Structures are given as C-alpha cells and as structure tokens.
Amino acid sequence: VVRRTAQSRAFRDGSPLVFARALSYVASEAGGEGGVGLGSVVAVYVERKSEKTGEKRRRKKGGGRRGKEGEDGGGEGCAHVAFGAAEDTVRECDSIGFGVYNPQSLYRVRMLCFGPGTADVRTYRSVQEAVKRHASSDATSGEAALRIILRQRIRDAISLRRSLDLPNPDTDSYRLINGEGDGLSGLALDILGGTAAVVMSSAGWCEVHRETILEELADVLRDHAMDPEYIWRTTASRLAQDGCPASETRDPPTLPAADAAVVVTENALRYAAFPWSGQKTGFYCDQRDNRAR
C-alpha cells in the first residue's frame, strides 16, 4: 500500500520508480512481504476513494503522530503490491500496472508496464492474460509476464531508433535501450560496430533475470536482421545500492583478451572501443552529439 503523499505522487503520475518510503504493505499468497523475492513480477494497485476512508483521514488531520510504515491500509490513492493469488485481496482497487520487486532497494518496485489509460494498455492486457493463464504457478506467470514486457519494450526501442535513422551508413553504434527512457529501469544496451551488443545491468532484477533478458534480446534483434555478440557488464556500486552485492552476481562467460577492441563508426568517424574492459559499455554512445561538435 502506498499512501497519497509527495513520495507516491511521482510514480502515480507515471514515474517508473516506487520508493520504499511510499510503501505501506505488500500482499502475497505467503502473507506480507516474505513470499516476494528479488525480481518477482508484481501487480501494483491504487485504492479507490471511499467516504469512510475520507472521513478517517479528516479526523486524523492535524493531530497525532504520523503512522509508521505498514499501519494504515486504507485511504484515497493508496497503492497495493500484489503477488500471485493475493491479487484477490485488491479486487476493490484500480490497477497501476506491473513491475519488478526488490525487498532491499530504496526503489521497491521498478514499474515496467502501466495500466488502463496509458499507451501501455495493450501490453498490459497481454500481461494480464498471461498471468491468468499461468495462475497456478507464480514463477511461471511471472516469467511469462516479463517476457511479454521485454519483447514489447525491445521492439519499441528498435522502432524508435529506426525513426531516428539509427543505424545508418555513417553510424553503426548507438544506445538501443536507455533504462527508464525505454521502459526498462536499470537496463541499458549499446550496439557497437553493429557486431557487439553490450548490456549494462545496474539493478538486481536484471541479474535475477539475466538469461531471460538475453534470450528475448537475441530473439527480437534476430527478427530485425541483427545478430550481434552479447556482452554482459555490471555496475557493482549501483547493484550494491540495489541490494545485490557483487558477490551475489554470477561471473560472465569467458571473455576475449581485455585489450580486444571493436571498431565503431559514428558520424563517419571510426573509433576503437573496448567493450570487455572499458568504462561502462566501452563507448559512451549517449555522447554522440557532444563528439560531433
């Protein structure tokens, strides 16, 4: 449950990050937060306004201490995070959408798909149908939901870049996925030289779902005549902040020599990039306009 406060206003207006301080409680089949692990796909709801809760809040106004997290389960605009069969407990609420949960992070839910009244509505309905089809298994329903969201987000990202004439004969290196900007908070993907795809993970859910992300990337990019080599990079400090210490992340597969370079072309200029050992993805694709000056 997320109260109608300054902390919750942003995500209710479309921000992809649901902050921990805005969260009051989590409903799950196992009861509370215990059954909802890192990377779990969850549904987020907002409670409908009622006369009763409105009166309750008016009586509280101006007096008494502020309730602790988890005390107040009602009120206008409260949002609920539901996992698995616990969705039945929020039948009287309006859906905000779906996201991935992290019990350790300041960003308790990273929204990946928004609900009715948004441009995401078709994807949202597909996710709803997938969850219903696999209702008997939380793990299966979450996996199916995540794959639908990833597939659509990657397709949208490709479509947007092509509308910007990327790639083109003068530029074969660009940022294909830019985290929140492409609806995938904590995930970035740079295409280098048209032959390497460097994934940058800075969120715990990305580490949990690494194989799923790589599989969906490969399938969608192949459908668009792209078959690069995938390189998975992480930002240890960001993962630690997200409750996923470096010691818990898996080692990447055997990589080429650290000094192996990929030749990239940008604005008709050629550069040597080092995706295996360089900073971030090995080439700051988001600085293309600055380099062109």
Image (spheres, rainbow, N blue to C red):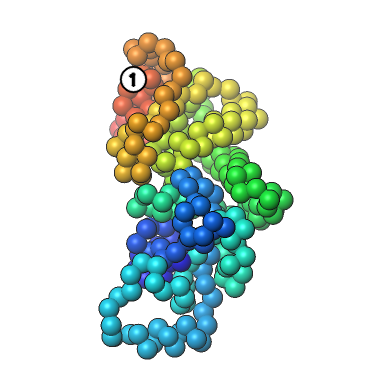
Horizontal and vertical percent position of residue 199: 45, 30
Q: Is residue 54 visible?
A: yes
Horizontal and vertical percent position of residue 90: 57, 68
Horizontal and vertical percent position of residue 126: 67, 51
Which element is circle 1 on? loop
Quadrant assignment, res 158: top right
Amino acid bearing label 1:
Ser
Q: Is residue 114 visible?
A: no
247 left or right of 211 in image: left
Dot 1 alpha-carbon crowd within 10 angstroms: few under 14, some 14 to 19, many 20 or more: some
Q: Which residue is mark 1?
A: 277
Q: Is residue 178 above or below residue 253?
A: below
Name the residue rendered at 38%, 87% in the picture: 58
Name the residue rendered at 41%, 63% in the picture: 23
125 left or right of 71 in image: right
Quadrant assignment, res 125: bottom right
Quadrant assignment, res 238: top left
Q: Nearer the viewer, residue 62 or 179?
A: 62
153 left or right of 280 in image: right
- Give the quadrant of the C terminus: top left
95 left or right of 178 in image: right
Q: Is residue 201 above or below residue 258?
A: below
Horizontal and vertical percent position of residue 166: 51, 32
